[in-house]
Amino acid sequence: MAKQLKLKIKNIQLAQAAGLEKEKPSPEKVKEKAKTQITPPAPTEEPPPRRRAKTKSAFAHIEEEEVKPKEEIKEENKVEELELEGQVLVTKLPSADESLVIEESKSEVKPPFSKVEKRGEPRGEQKLGPTGRHVKDLYTPTKREPAPKLAPAEETKPAEKAPPSPAATTPAATAFVEEEDKSTKKKVREYKDLKPAKRELRPFDARDRQGLSEGEEERWRKKRPLKGQKRAFEEPIIRPNKLKIRIPISVKDLASEMKLKSSELIQKLLMQGAAYTVNDLLNDEATILFIGAEFGCDIAIDRVEEDRIQITKNTIQEEIASSDPKKLVIRPPVVAFMGHVDHGKTSLIDAIRKSNIVKTEAGAITQHIGAFRCKTASGDITILDTPGHEAFSAMRARGAEVTDIVVLVVAGDEGIREQTLEAIQHAKAAHVTIVVAINKSDKPNFNPENIYRQLADADLLPEIWGGQVVTVNTSAVTGEGIVQLLEMLALQSEVLELHANPHTRARGTVLESELHKGFGATATILIQNGTLRKGDAIVLENLWGRVKTMRDEYGNFLEEAGPATPVEIAGLSGVPEAGDPFIVVKNEKEAREIAEVRATGTKAKAMMQKKPVSLENLLQEDSAKGKKILKLIVRGDVQGSVEALKATLLKIHSEKVDLDVIFTGVGDVTESDAQLAAASNAVILGFHTQVESHATSLIKELGVVVRLHDIIYHAVDDVKGLMQGLLDKIAEEKLAGRAEVRAIFKASQLGIIAGCIVIEGAIIRSHHIRVERGGKTIWKGSIASLKREKEDVREVKKGLECGILLQNFNDVQVGDFLQTYEIIYLTQEI
């Protein structure tokens, strides 16, 4: 209460200081004023007084008091109350003789400060404001002249327009009266408070609940256009006559560049028989040029970005040929050993390198591509060991592309086989020199003449028969012919004149890649030109990297590697594909940019390779709905093995089961693989890999099937078995016995019992039974009871009598035949 009282007092004081509150005169003064006031005569026709609006400003109060048309003149020596800024001034009214002078002074002095006393003069009785200072101290005092005396008649009738007195008929008095009329009729400026705009209450919504409507109290109002204002002129669309774009480009982007609607382009393409949507990509240059010609726009293909991400248009051989001859050096030859599986390729390499690689291979067969650098008496050579199994065709092709000489290993006791012919085709396609090593010369059934004939049939005429193909008889066990083979390789290398420029940036090919537990993504690469140094930034198709470590085949760390050197590098952004080319660029930033642009282009091309919708495709999909699908997740130790295993699995043809490889990866089986397999109902197939320790519990919990193999043909056979297991087994009925109904016996509790005699085979209680009547089967079911001479039996053989009670069937008649059969489920072939 005390606080509210203080606030109320403070508000009253402030109102008094601003002149918003007037003092009410006492009742005695009001009565005295009424007695002394003379009743005025009937007023002349005057306009009614102007009423002021209630909303006018309180600051115009003082001016309104000064411009009232009629003033009340009180008697002499009476006290007049003046209100000025909340202060009450007590002054004495002038006499009647002085009234004229007072009115004249009113017209000369500005209101309301004409009655303010000078600062130096005594103020008499006055009240101070709440600040302790008088409001008069804030204004400069004005000089007051002595006022002339007024006639008594004017004193008694201030509001009546009486005839002018003799004193007022003088020219000066006439001018004073006119001046007074002007001052009284002067309009006073009003200060009005603005009315607040009415606000419509809006409902409390979700934005208020979330506190998002703060600062939105004022509603947005659409700005009304001014009258007579002209609307903005819409400029016509100017379509370009020439355009330069990059491909691939979507239909939407091409339409935007040409300032057209996408529907116009789609309509034009549809008229030519090509169905496109807005987001489809256009990669055909002829189609883009046709669209430009139809709409009168000359479209040019921008290949600047394409050249930038390509880095160079020259091949490795063209780059070597264009190099300065003084900078070229002779490099060692790259020799690839190819041939059929188990013909002794790896054993022959071990004999040359004096190593024992065969023991490290699972199943004693090579399943990875190997790269080695070895020194011989005939000079240094780089050896590539390729697998001979039919599944590793891509590896053999990759080895033939990067090699200079192919050593075709043929077992002298077996002759040329399927993979040998395939290796010959790869070597011919790569235009490389072929040297034939007829291996296993230590065996008793070694027959080189048969090999010569088979080589001639394959268009490889040996030198012994007058051809150009060099043949050497070798034995990895005894070492026979190894020296001669190395000499022939050195001779062929001199004939080929192999050179490289070690002073330029490195270029080469990825032979193999894997995900190492310690080094991360690693790749075995073959440097074909230039010198690779530690710390170089490289680009590998859609991946990039910085060479952090570089090791040789023995695990030794290297700082640099020259031409024809196979090394294993680490520090890549991902696992590259085997066979991808690599090239060194300026810095890591440039490598990342190029790789990202290439990845974007690859993704766009993948989106374009969608299967076109046709009636034939729809019918194929409908027919394939009844097929079983085996989904696989393939994991391998290296990229080449994964690639070979996937290609082999997809070659499995079946009209009943489809094989779908939903994911392939390099490394151990992870938790994400288990979750993907559980979600898609797939089987995880691991090749030369293991399951991560922390993923084992999740695999058991989810019930995911994981199959691990080290030999590729074992993995293929296992997948065939899984495909076969998906097929429904075929039910086949095998006839077991036949009986004829000779009599019928009725039992009140059991029903009808058929008295039979077995005429074929044997009636076994556990078998199924059917009732035949008139050559037609009328019922199938099971045997409820089988008895012979009032004893339950399991089997009744041919020629014996028995009683048979059928399960839930009582319509047996004499002359019916009962046949028992066994259902056998047969496994389908894929």
Image (cartoon, helix red, strand yellow):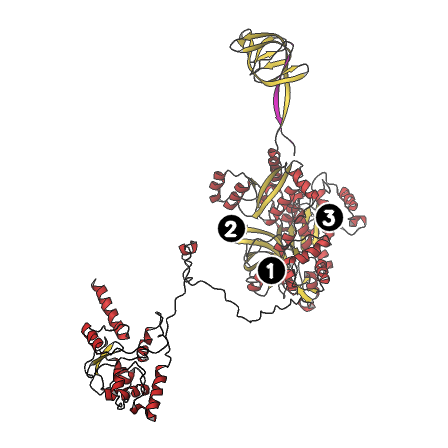
Alpha carbon of mark 2 to alpha carbon of mark 3: how far?
37 Å
- Going by the numbered disc 2, the residue's amino acid type is Lys
Compared to 675, does 241 lie above or below?
below
Looking at numbered disc 3 in the image, what kind of residue is underneath it? Ile
The N terminus - image quarter: bottom left
Residue 535 image point, x, y percent: 55, 62
Which residue occupies 26% across, 88% down? Answer: 151
**Quadrant of the image occupied by residue 439:** top right
Q: Quadrant of the C terminus?
A: top right
Question: Image check: 617 left or right of 808?
Answer: right
Does dot 2 land on a helix, a strand or a loop? loop
In the image, the segment drawn in magenta is 812-830
Q: Position of residue 700 (x, y in %)?
A: 48, 38
Q: Are marks 2 and 3 in contact (CB under 8 Å)?
A: no
Quick one: which residue is furthest to the front in this view? Answer: 42
Q: Where does the image place residue 194, in percent across and percent down from the top left?
A: 39, 70
The mark found on residue 424 in the picture is 3
Pick the residue in front: 284 or 375.
284
Residue 517's label in the rendered image is: 2
Q: Nearer the viewer, residue 715 or 335?
A: 715
